Each structure stands twice: as C-alpha cells, then as structure tokens.
Amino acid sequence: MPASSDAPVNVALVGYGNAGKTFHAPLITACPGLRLHSVVTTRPDALHADRPDVRALPEFADVLADADIDLVVLATPDALHAPQAEAALNAGKAVVVDKPFALNLVDARRLVELSEARGLLLSVFQNRRRDADFLALQAELASGRLGDIVTVESRYDRHRPLVRDRWRENDGDGVWLDLGPHLVDQMLVLFGRPLAIACDMAVQRPGGRTPDWVHAVLRYADKRVVLNAAMLCAAPDVRFAVHGTHGSWLKSGLDVQEDQSKAGLAVGAPGWGVDPKPGTFVDGETGERSPAPGPAGDYRAYYSGIAAALRDGGPPPVTARQALSVMEVLDAGLRSAAARREVPIDQ
C-alpha cells in the first residue's frame, strides 16, 4: 500500500477492451484516492489515444514484478480471472476482479481463502449495486409502502440476434455467468441467501454456442424471485416488477452510465447516472399509478469504497465472502439446469 495515507493508491488495470475502457479506466481516474498507474494491453495505441499519460505494459508479469503497484484490477476474459487473481495475490497485490469472480466455485473458494490467509483485499466489481434503478428499488423497499414483498421479477433482456465471434460467446456458460452475477448479487443484497434455485437455460439464437437465455426462480420462505436474461427480446419492457401486499413497483429501461461513458461523457458530469425512465408505483387499493423517481446512479461509489478500504483497512464495498455467495448461487443454478430440478442452497 502507499507509504503515506495521503498518497494515492497505484492501480494497474489488466485489459483495455470494453470493460477496461468503458468502466474501469474512467472510474479509477475519477477517484481521488486512486491513480491509474499502468494498463496491460495489446493495443497501446488505443490506450494512449484516450490516456496519453498512462503507462502501457505488454505483459501481466510486468505488473506482478512492479513494487510500486498496489492494486491490480482484472478486466480480462473470464477464464483468466482466477489464475490472474491468484498470481496477483501471491505477489502481494490487492485485487479487484470483474465479474464473474471465477469460472467455477472451487476456484472462487481458493481465491477467498488465499486472500484471507495473506490479509489482502479481494473484491469483485459489482457496479450494478449503484445502478439508478437498483438504488430506486432500495429506497422503495425502505419506504415500506409496498408492504410485505411477495414476488420480484428482475430481467436483463436484449435484442442481439447475431452471435458475435468473441470469447464471451464462444465458450462457457453464456448469459448466466455474464449477467447472472449482477442479477443474483442484487437479490442477495436485498433479501439474503435463498433456500433453493430452479434454473433453466437454452441456446435460442441460430449458431449460438453458449446459453443465451436463462430463467431462474429463487425460493425464499416468504417470497419468490424470478431472474431472467435473454438475447432475443426486442421488447425489453420490464427491468423490475416488484409486488407487495400494498402495491407494486414497475421499472423499464437500463441504467445509463455505460452508454454515457461510451458516448464520451465524463464521469460525474451534469446528468451522469440520471434515470430518464423513473419507476412507477401502483397503489394496491386504488390502482392509481404515480411516478417514483430515485437517486442518480453512480458507479464511482465502488472505487471510492475500494480506496477507503485500502487506506483505512475496512471492508471493501463488495467483500470476497459476498462474491463467494454469488458464486454459490450461480453454481447451484448450473446444477439445477443440468438436472432439470430445484437445487437447495446451503445456509
């Protein structure tokens, strides 16, 4: 860690594809407690066109050997997450991993145990805890006006009929490990661990090689949570539908921060994270509908929390144990889909 608590944390970002360029680099740069020191990339020209003052490194090994680097952020293909995180922890670096945490539960458990044994920060980039819609839902639940929650539907649906030749669509478990970590993590934040999961997956697109549709039901003692992700949905009208004993809360549209970053809007600029489609509250007695706006989304909170954890020694905004809980649910979902039955989740 930095020699002085006032000195910024030196960060090495590994990977400068969509995740590194759109999410991590802008957010790290916008965080006063962090300094984007180096980026490992095979495209140094692309990096320097955006960030001419950041050092480009050709190899991951260069990061491990650099004593000036305090934090390693992995924005690499999923299959590299576990081995690179393990190598970085063994090199004495704090680590942030983009989701999914790992490709399997065994690797995830090994990483958590290693981080705890070495006393090093390990966190997973669950940025969608800071989506505007999720923050609005948390506020709605805190208000109590929905009553007791009985059903939650959470969907990430897109219309991408063409299968692209990229690692994410060529192998693995498809949308369940791509979007499932967000869907599951948000529900664990709201409601804790479910009792069981029933999950179904399918390949729907012509030429598809990995599941591009998934439907999962999380069973809680007092409610059911439905998770859905699809790549052939031209009408993604439902993001959240939450039903309680006193009313419902409905939300369409996705958080805008990713698109704002891709469009070149500076992180934190006026309008950053502001939801153009606020949710709707439906009164259970009257059926009356009223707008239910929430706070703006702000992914900066994740890296601000990482900087504070490294400076003060407190827990990161997403702990390794929380990330492991997500992996346990994802693993149970895979087993449920393979066996075509509900699978219990250890409590």
Image: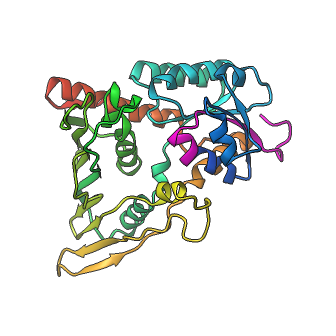
Residue 213 falls inside the magenta stretch:
no
Instruction: Tell me the quarter of the image containing the N terminus.
Output: top right
In depth, the one of 87 and 187 nearer the eye is: 87
- Residue at 19% x, 24% y is 338
Horizontal placement of 149 versus 268: left or right? left
Q: Is residue 67 visible?
A: yes
Q: Is residue 308 visible?
A: no
Residue 130 location, x and y as percent?
49, 55
Instruction: Tell me the quarter of the image containing the C terminus.
Output: top left
- Residue at 67% x, 25% y is 58
Residue 286 location, x and y as percent?
17, 81
Residue 75 location, x and y as percent?
54, 35
Residue 75 vs 154, above or below: the answer is above
Per the rendered image, the range of residues in magenta is 1-22
Q: Quadrant of residue 256?
A: bottom left
- Residue at 62% x, 45% y is 25
